[in-house]
Amino acid sequence: MFDLFTKGRAVGLHEAGMSVRAVAQRIGVNKATVQRWVARFRQIGTARGMPGGGRPNKTNLREDRALGRVVEGHRKMSAVTLIVNFYHRFRLSKQTIIRRLNKRGYTSCRVAKVPRLNATHRQNRMTWAINHSFWDDNRWNRVVWSDECRIILNSVDGRARVWRRPGERFREDLVQETVAAGGGSIMLWAAFWGAGKSAIRIVHGSVNGEVYVNILTEFLNDNQETLDGQGIWWFQDDNARPHRARIVTQFKETQGIRQLPWPAVSPDLNPIEHVWDHLKRALRLRHIENLAQLQLAVREEWEAIDNQFLGTLISSMRSRIREVLNSNGGHTRY
């Protein structure tokens, strides 16, 4: 927006004999804008813009700023709640509140769901980040990142959206049908490191200490020679109860597995979480009707994940640590 002084200056320069192009260059606007100001001056005797049509705003600039201050202190309050608690005297609509907030840079978004962190969790995350802040990509590439993941056959994707008109909410092709318990599920275990990845294992039943030892035994049989060939390596798993069972700890000590210390409640520090998300997205693009098809699809999609993608995730470790330090052990965007 240009003030009246700038418009008047442009008109004056043109009336004094300067060309439209020269005026535009002097003022720093395009030619069409100068031509419009000059034409308006010649038509109505002023460069001031014509008053806009339509109904005037119900709130002024001062009240809009006040709305911004209220929202800054009540970020989780809905537009309707804002009207009831603060703006009922203006008789504003929900859409008016949303437009005012959009103008001030606020957008209504889904709340990001993150694990609850207490003071101890935050301190442990800070300590871990400080202790590993000097690690470079060479070290992170020699960490074996592992985890379990449950895949539900008919999972409800909260991110799914459709384009629909009023009255089409329950149209057959625009709904997402659900079944009890998601139609069944499978438990997976897998691991990856800088130079490769394990086979994906489908775990039948629940994971306890004994089952986890069997998983690790199979993993070492398939990959220990490769891992030992790259020098010192570390094994990462989270603090789930089966991972810290006595039988598992004894097995790791017997096999000489170097355990990477891990802070509790820190899935954002484990890049394999992004691999699981990538896998689930790929599975949603496939038509899968039963658990047998799901198992086959999981194996195919796991094999399709390339090392470049995995390497990019490992390279993000320094950024993850930096964000933990910047947030004093709090949540990160990962």
Image: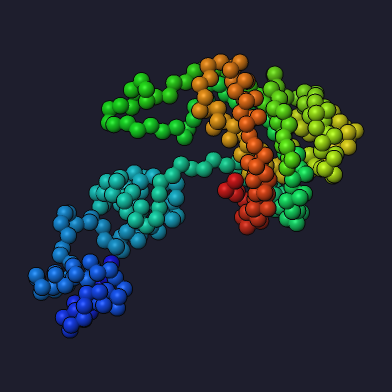
Within the image, what quadrant is residue 10 found in? bottom left
Q: Is residue 58 above or below residue 200?
A: below
Q: Residue at x 35, y 33 (%)?
A: 163
Within the image, what quadrant is residue 5 found in? bottom left
Describe residue 182's horizontal placement relative to residue 141 as left or right: left
Q: Is residue 267 above or below residue 107?
A: above
Q: Residue at x 26, y 52 (%)?
A: 89
Q: Is residue 276 visible?
A: yes
Q: Residue at x 86, y 31 (%)?
A: 251
Q: Residue at x 54, y 40 (%)?
A: 113
Residue 181 in picture, x, y percent from top left = 55, 19
Residue 8 in picture, x, y percent from top left = 20, 77
Describe residue 223's horizontal placement relative to residue 152 as left or right: right
Query: 258 and 224: which one is in front?
Result: 224
Q: How is the image coloured?
A: rainbow
Query: 45 and 110: which one is in front?
Result: 45
Residue 176 in picture, x, y percent from top left = 43, 24
Q: Is residue 6 visible?
A: no
Q: Is residue 297 above or below residue 270?
A: above
Q: Residue furthest right?
A: 254
Residue 33 in picture, x, y percent from top left = 23, 68
Describe residue 193's horizontal placement relative to residue 25 as left or right: right
Query: 307 and 276: which one is in front?
Result: 307
Q: Quadrant of the N terminus?
A: bottom left
Tell how many labels.
Answer: 0
Query: 79 and 157: which one is in front?
Result: 157
